[in-house]
Image (cartoon, rainbow, N blue to C red):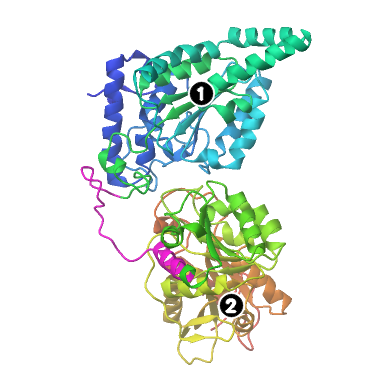
Amino acid sequence: MGILDTIRNPQDLSKLSGAQLDQLAAEVRDFLIGNVSRTGGHLGPNLGVVELTIAVHRIFDSPRDSIVFDTGHQSYVHKLLTGRQDFSTLRQQGGMSGYPDRAESEHDIVESSHASSSLSWADGISRARQLTGDGDRFVVAVVGDGALTGGMAWEAINNIAADKKRRVVIVVNDNGRSYAPTVGGFADYLASLRPTIDSLRAAPSYEGTLEWWKRKLQKGGPAGQFTYKSLHAMKKGIKDWWAPQGMFEDLGMKYIGPVDGHDLQAMENALSTAKNYAGPVIVHAMTEKGHGYAPARAHEADQFHAVGIIDPETGAPTEAGGAKSWTAVFADEIADIADERQDIVGITGAMLIPVGLHKFAARHPERVFDVGIAEQHALTSAAGMAFGGLHPVVAVYATFLNRAFDQLLMDVALHKAGVTIVLDRAGVTGPDGASHHGMWDMAMVQIVPGLHLAAPRDATRLREELREAVAIEDAPSVLRYSKGNVGPEVDAVERLEDGVDVLARRPAGSSENDVLIVSVGAMSELALDVSGRLGAQGISSTVVDPRWVLPVRQSIIDLAARHRLVICIEDGVRAGGVGSRIRQEMRAAGVDTALNEVGLPVEFLEHGTRSQVLERVGMTAQQITHDVVAQVLGTKVPFARPLPGQEHPSTGSIPQL
């Protein structure tokens, strides 16, 4: 039995010797490499926080002390140390979440894993502790993987720093740059003194003494004030030479570090010092993503930030490469468009490669901007660039557009800015779960005046709709597509005058029009499957892909008027979605055909594969066909329009077809 097998809760760590802790760290890394290579997941970030997480749990008392991870994908080690050592179902339906999950453990607090939020959580939790008489309990925020590039984090720091009594410890997991300390004997000597000096600076008596001398000197007339300013300037100069703490202490927070985040004893010393301080503290830990695993360290792009199933020895993917991904199609096309148009610029939020702007950046590095995890800034900056004569293409995950809605509405749309927003991972994304499903975007943008929304069904339509989007110069345009590989090409049998594609008429040449199926984006294969199943039941159908779902095309309204029932299939929430918008436009045009919205429920959907999640919510060809047949027969609302000479059905009655 290894050391890791004996850890059932964080308190078990206190029994271990230094040698046993080193062995535990090695076992944790071996465990992560062996297990995550079989399931896929966030490997690199967790390899980088092994010692850091052990130290946090050794010094603080979870769950009495609250530990918040930002972002949550660096919480695998935390899961292991809190008794969750079965990773065989990591990120699989019914299995362990890839993020903190309150349902899994009392040690988990924040589930959303939208970066830069942890310090606001820490601010709120610590305020609540003060007001409820639990002010001696600590809140520890582990902030890393670019979370401090988000403005929300700095808003929170500003508030935390204003209250000197709150027990908040912010552990900055700094793995975003290479930290190269000065080398040589004198530098080593200074480094050996750092823990002693940090302990002195964080001692309450030290702060009290400084405050006493400050008041004494400032009351001592011009000479005293001059002496205070001189000594304060000298102190600040020495501190800035000693360690790059500048902005943190300028905000009024005690700073400790930098500390080697892979030196367990150094981390424990720094955290103990922070714990003994009677106010908010920042502990600056330098770590290396992928630490201890050569394939990850050698991976220049992202040190195995997230991997699929890999060979644990080599790090090479074991799954055969399949069809081209949606992201790859976008990456090629936007780079080609950038070659043709000098006004095209790219903007992303710390996800250059995941959203496919890397090829554009390689060809035109001066025209691609990574603003960090700052989606709000990205949208407003894009509005400014549009005003300046450029056409920005902002590429983010669909779920992260939620964070920039105000900027989309008031900065981009209100000013009629020609900005194209490309939403990757739209719809059900699968193993990352509730916080990462891109299921809110289509409902959210419905209320933005003048916005154009496109949802391509295949690679060819993605390319053409992207080009159409960047041609719009007087309003925002949004292009959204799914995660994973692009499906087969779905050719249209006809393109109508306003750009709507007719994908099928079944039976061909039929004069009867029972059901109009509006297929949104990647739902085309499902829509065609439903159409075929309806045909087998003697129900005729027309399948259309709007291509541009906003504004609603007139041909959709005209087709709806000629059918007995309309169903809209979309992989966004039903409430306020595309189907809801089409129904409103139909009513405004005096078309009373019943419409059924087939989409996602307004729920937080747990992780699983895309097909598993869709099946769980009833979005299968079999279930949709069953419902439509019942609606045509008049046994399920909304009822299809009666045939000529037929009475309008009421619930329970079955008209003759």
Which disc is residue 565 wearing?
Answer: 2
Q: Position of residue 613 (x, y in %)?
A: 44, 55
Q: Left or right: where does residue 428 sit relative to residue 139?
A: left
Q: Is residue 142 above or below residue 269?
A: below
Nearer to the camera, 257 or 31:
257
Q: Is residue 299 above or below residue 341?
A: above
Q: Position of residue 105 (x, y in %)?
A: 45, 31
Q: Amino acid at mark 2?
A: Leu
Pair 2/1: label in front: 1
Q: Can residue 221 be seen from the camera position used here?
A: yes
| Numbered disc 1: secondary structure | helix
What residue is at 56 percent from the left and 67 percent from the top? 343
**Which quarter of the image is occupied by the N terminus?**
top left
What residue is at 55 percent from the left and 86 percent from the top? 496
Nearer to the camera, 281 or 38:
281
Q: Left or right: where does residue 484 sit relative to residue 494?
A: left
What residue is at 46 percent from the left and 70 percent from the top? 339
Q: Amino acid at mark 1?
A: Trp
Q: Left or right: where does residue 235 sit relative to residue 624?
A: right
For the residues labelled 2 and 1, the Cα–Cα distance comes to: 74 Å
Q: Position of residue 276 (x, y in %)?
A: 53, 13
Nearer to the camera, 245 or 600:
245
Any magenta on residue 325?
yes
Q: Disc 1 marks which residue?
A: 241
Disc nearer the start of the sequence (2/1) = 1
Q: Is residue 38 above or below residue 100?
A: below
Magenta-highlighted residues: 309-337
| Numbered disc 2: secondary structure | strand
What residue is at 63 percent from the left and 22 percent from the top? 129
Q: Confirm or deny contact between disc 2 and disc 1 (CB under 8 A).
A: no
Q: Quadrant of residue 486?
A: bottom left
